[in-house]
Amino acid sequence: MKLRPDEIVQLFLAVAALLGVGRALGELARKLGQPSVLGEMLAGIVLGPTVLGYFAPEAMLYLFPATGSVPIALDALTTVAISLFLLVAGMEVDLSTMFRQGRVAVGVGVGSTLLPFALGFGVFYFGAAGGGSTGTGTLIFALFMATALSISALPVIAKTLLDLGMYRSDIGMLIVAVAIFNDLVGWIVFALVLSLMGGGHGHRFDVGETVTLTLGFAAIMLTIGRWFINAILPWLQAHLSWPGGVLGFALTITLAGAAFTEWIGVHAIFGAFLVGVALGDSQHLRERTRTTIDQFVSFVFAPLFFASIGLRVDFVADFDWMLVSVIFVLACAGKIIGSGVAARLLGMPARQSWAVGFGLNARGAMEIILGLLALDAGLIDKRMFVALVVMALGTSMLAGPVMLRLLQRKKSRRFTALVGAGSFIPEMRATDRFKAILELVPVSGARGVDLAAASDAVIERERVIPTGLGNGIALPHARIKGLAAPQIAMGISKQGIDFDSPDGEPAHIICIILTPQEDQTTALELYRDILTTFKDKDFREKVLRVKSYTELLALLASGTGPRPGEATVAPAAH
Amino acid sequence: MKLRPDEIVQLFLAVAALLGVGRALGELARKLGQPSVLGEMLAGIVLGPTVLGYFAPEAMLYLFPATGSVPIALDALTTVAISLFLLVAGMEVDLSTMFRQGRVAVGVGVGSTLLPFALGFGVFYFGAAGGGSTGTGTLIFALFMATALSISALPVIAKTLLDLGMYRSDIGMLIVAVAIFNDLVGWIVFALVLSLMGGGHGHRFDVGETVTLTLGFAAIMLTIGRWFINAILPWLQAHLSWPGGVLGFALTITLAGAAFTEWIGVHAIFGAFLVGVALGDSQHLRERTRTTIDQFVSFVFAPLFFASIGLRVDFVADFDWMLVSVIFVLACAGKIIGSGVAARLLGMPARQSWAVGFGLNARGAMEIILGLLALDAGLIDKRMFVALVVMALGTSMLAGPVMLRLLQRKKSRRFTALVGAGSFIPEMRATDRFKAILELVPVSGARGVDLAAASDAVIERERVIPTGLGNGIALPHARIKGLAAPQIAMGISKQGIDFDSPDGEPAHIICIILTPQEDQTTALELYRDILTTFKDKDFREKVLRVKSYTELLALLASGTGPRPGEATVAPAAH
């Protein structure tokens, strides 16, 4: 059975649309400080029944036909995509981080799992029982809802902490450890819920067998499997091509593990997740293998999968305000109170305790995947699925801002955020430091202040303390009365300007930093950021070759410049 | 339409088997100095009708069912895989390399294309005409065979030249430039052959329209498309997440280009190839984007695709000795004579000219893909396909050894090939240099010689000229009478041993090099290789932490060691 040419056209167009629009909206979400999964799902909503299907139903049906080979092919691709996404999620579960955090992590972990679980189970079991139904169906449904409310999304939490510069702090590592605990327990409980559904959808085993096989597989992967992978990785890295050998190995065992859990009646992604945990835990797994898998999965497979969700559900028709609100309140209450109270009882200060609660409250992509599987299994309906998605996105968007406020921290300032197209001069004309200041201050974008006075202030300070810091960098600076926000103007001087630096070298990279009179800390933060950014000699040489603001941004983002003149062919393995 | 759970199990097992066995046999082929595509195809032969289907037909039909959703899903995956493979192949087509080689490249390019094309067309058109059939079918068949005989496989040629250490030599760059020319012309001609088949399989356009659209698309991609991609890449790199933004963009336009060429009635991979050419030619495409795509495609998608070929053809039943021989001889004669004579006429020395011919003779993966498309289109039968595959693999395996012999070059010696598990001591006990020599020489694996005399010879030389070379490296050496081949013993001394080095530092990495009495060059080659390998200070420190031979190999292969004690969670984008 092969795809016909017209089906290949449809399939490729469909994948291109999901990937292209998914990445584009994902990037947009990122720019706005939101999780990229938000934008990726939005792409599916735009391309699916909610928008495109509403305005141009034929176009939607051409791209995403409901029958024939194309939907089967798309389903296969997204099933592989989601399994690889869970592989990466599993690889991030670092068991040793969890164990190192010890008593407090376990305490908060239990609190942050038990309360939402109890709350969810209570509401949905007795709520439904109050409606008269108390059969196995209700029990399984209540168990699922309890699980759905009690998970946390490690990836989105790790990303939020990184953005806030709190990843390596004590509270950051605690939150990560608890999230790992939550993730691991959540997936195992969910697998059990699936296995309780009459031995899974395949009915190959009875409930008892499926539960035993599920727990047995998890136990084996976390012990013998973990040990085996750690033992075989050095051999693979020594004898196979690098990094292709390990890459092939990792994907092969992931697919095999996924096939096994699907076979016992749980979902394929559970096996992929556990293989990921075992693989990611190995100290022999190299950073490069990790990032190659991570990049391809996060930027290609994940957008494809999340965009495809929007195709299946109409987020307008199935949006139920009441249900959305109830789920959202239940989720936040259970998680924040459960985690926060546990942290308080274990002796953490109040603000920190609630910050931990809001951090763990982020549900992110994991909740969406859980919901989708439940929808597929017939456990929940589309209205409940939409409510879970909204809750997942809402809690994720809330986590960062609330934690910042509770901990009274500011996002650490990046000088790149302050340099715009207008405040960058790729080729400065000035030949001495005072002219350089006069050339740069006017483009700094400082509004509401007298630019001449600002230039004078910078020059005055430069006379007293020259700001050449060595390595070809000079950072003239002044605090300006009446300035509302920090401003930077950056200039590059190919021939170099003498800023009286300790190493006697002329400055090639000059950043003027203007900060408000009353702000005593930002300038130092920016100093440190600029010096760190340009600490590498090769990198500074690339900066000097930059010809425009776009090239500067590209260089700062990727760490490498355009290829030098002589182009070469990159040979591959075939 | 969704896959059933049992179909997901089958699909995942099938992909795991193709990928796992494909990678394993691909690695084996590589170890034996053969192209990995050979091993990857062998995996399909083992899993398909030729072997598994012969011995255990039920197992084969379970893994690879002939009907239902699984074959559709597998076909979709392999179609995407082959398109991405052509994207990478296209990215290696560096137009500027081609243009730089100028007159000679064009001359050899024309010779190496025209003669095999004319030969192929003559034999198959008039051969068939002799049999009485002279219709359009014969014309198209003859045109295809002419094209199939005249292509070269850039990737396998680049790989062979790299292995021989000739990639950057004049003759190497000439061969690469001609191969690029061949590749580009070959694919465009093949696309034309496909479009001649009554306007492609879709019959959407007539022949004239399809030909026009094909040439038009190629012309646009190589001019405006190339310019546009080069212009937009810096913006993407500046404003999107790195490297995910570019990755998503590259795959989206590849799929869109592939959909377009499939739509006009040529095959999808032609569009993917042209997008790859336009993309790879941009000086703004960063090395990291290139390698991330290349690794995932070469080590995951390519094995999947090439292994899947073996599933479709029985390489024993359809092996026709006569046809295989004719195709092989025709292919070699046309290509080697065409390229060689052109090179001679353009003034190259005889041996070099024939080396160019044998280099360009390698057909590799490209021929196999071309053959498969022709098989699918009904242009050739399975017997002819098998003959083309054998020719592709045979010519690829021949290229390296014959070029070595013609150019009287030797593969440059790598010291890693000479250090075995038995000749490596991770923790030396010796405390002075003479004891170190006595500790290492016995494990060097030198056979047929008196080890005591060999130790004495090394010690004698060490007394005259101390071999501490600084940077913690010492390379004691002697030429030994009666020794058949060079031998190395490597030891690591954590505390360091004084080898009287110019920088006064003790040696931590000690390699004893024993070479045959009459061999005057190998020792120097090995010196240079060892010093280059350990030139980096951080890397040398990692070497000192190595605890076994396997860890040493892994470190040498990947450039990085196991993670240090404190493990961390790698955060992803979700």
Image: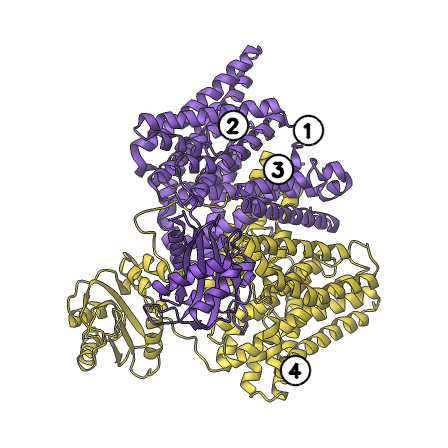
Chain colours: A yellow, B purple
Callout 2 environment at 10 Å: few (<14), some (14 to 19), or many (20+)?
many
- Residue drawn where x is 79% and y is 61% of the image: A210
Q: Tell me whether the residue at label 3 lies in contact with that at label 4, contact meaning CB atoms closer than 8 angstroms.
A: no
Q: Which residue is mark 4?
A: A107
Height in image: A45 above or below B203? below
Q: CA distance from mark 2 to mark 4?
A: 67 Å
Query: Which of the labelled discs sits on residue B194, or is there none?
Result: 2
Counting residues from the start of the chain, the first of labels 3 and 2 encountered is 2
Which quarter of the picture shows residue B318?
top right
- The reply to whether label 1 and label 3 mark residues of one chain is yes
Height in image: B34 above or below A283? above
Callout 1 environment at 10 Å: few (<14), some (14 to 19), or many (20+)?
few
Q: CA distance from mark 3 to mark 2?
A: 20 Å
Left or right: A508 in relation to B450: left
> Which SS class for mark 1?
loop
**Of residues B364 and A325, the one drawn nearer to the viewer in this rendering:** B364
Which quarter of the picture shows residue B377?
top right
- The reply to whether label 2 and label 4 mark residues of one chain is no
Chain letter of the residue beneath label 3 in the structure image: B
The amino acid beneath tag 1 is Ala
- The x and y percentages for residue A204 are 81, 54
Q: Which residue is mark 3?
A: B309
**Of residues B153 and B325, the one drawn nearer to the viewer in this rendering:** B325
Query: Which of the labelled discs sits on residue B46, or is there none?
Result: none
Does any portion of residue A409 appear in the rendered image?
Answer: yes
Mark 1 vs mark 2, foreground winner is 1
Which quarter of the picture shows residue A7?
top right
Q: Which residue is mark 1?
A: B317
For the N terminus of chain A, the image quarter is top right
Callout 3 environment at 10 Å: few (<14), some (14 to 19), or many (20+)?
many
Mark 1 vs mark 3, foreground winner is 1
Q: CA distance from mark 3 to mark 4?
A: 55 Å
